[in-house]
Image (cartoon, rainbow, N blue to C red):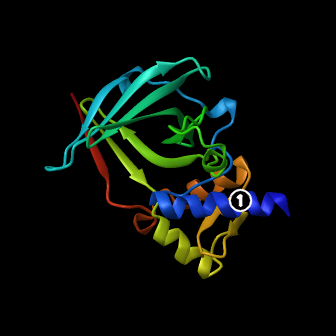
Amino acid sequence: MMIKRILTLLIVSFIFVGCTLIPSLNPIYKTKDIFFKESLLGAWANMEEKVNENWTFEKDNFLKNSYKLIHTKKGEKREFNAVLVKIGNDFFIDIFISQLKLESNNYLYCSHFFPVHTFSKIKIEKDKIIIQMFDYEWMTKQIGEKQIEMDYIISSENTFLLTASTEDLQKFVIKNKDNKEAFYDDLILKKN
């Protein structure tokens, strides 16, 4: 019962934060799937006009061959851990927070946040990267139509959290990696 309450609170926190990425309790990778590319290192800027967004990848020591991702949007900086994953012939990026740092001393408030993984397809080119994020609304529709063959929970607020194993998450991305409906529009970042 306590686990159900914690998961419900976690899902509610997504609503208040306005998350639109697909949250997963488990990573999309196993150690054997981790891949490191030097070409991802550096600062990248969103190519859309009027969008003040930067992604900076640095080598991280949290996990062998992982990255520290510093995401800046409208002057607000947040740090994440990121792992580049090769599944078949495609690359994906798994982004998570290894140490949740909340700017609050209120234990009750801080207890309502739980770190999760999000994952996206990624193409790394010489001077740009293309990130294809799975579409939360598409996934919600697939769940509603019983088209998803992996574990998840749905809260009373009708939001979901993937609870599938890494193996099942990988099967999901392999099945949907070329389905344009499964992704938001490409996020194109240009090297600074």
Q: Position of residue 57 (x, y in %)?
A: 39, 27
Q: Is residue 149 visible?
A: no
Q: Position of residue 27 (x, y in %)?
A: 64, 43
Q: Position of residue 82 (x, y in %)?
A: 51, 33
How many marks overall? 1
User: Could you say which quadrant of the image residue 47 lies in?
Assistant: top left
> Would residue 138 appear left or right of 57 to someone viewing this image?
right
Say if 21 sits above or below 144 in the image: above
Residue type at the position of mark 1: Leu
Q: Which residue is mark 1?
A: 7
Name the outermost residue toward the front: 106
> Would residue 50 appear left or right of 54 to someone viewing this image?
left
Say if 144 sits above or below 64 in the image: below
Viewer-side residue, 175 vs 43: 43
Badge 1 crowding class, 10 Å Cα cut-off, few under 14, some 14 to 19, many 20 or more, is: many
From the image, which quarter does the C terminus lie in? Answer: top left
- Which residue is painted at 54% across and 59% down in the image? 14
> Would residue 150 appear left or right of 184 to someone viewing this image?
right
User: Could you say which quadrant of the image residue 183 lies in?
Assistant: bottom left
- Which residue is painted at 48% across and 71% down in the image? 138
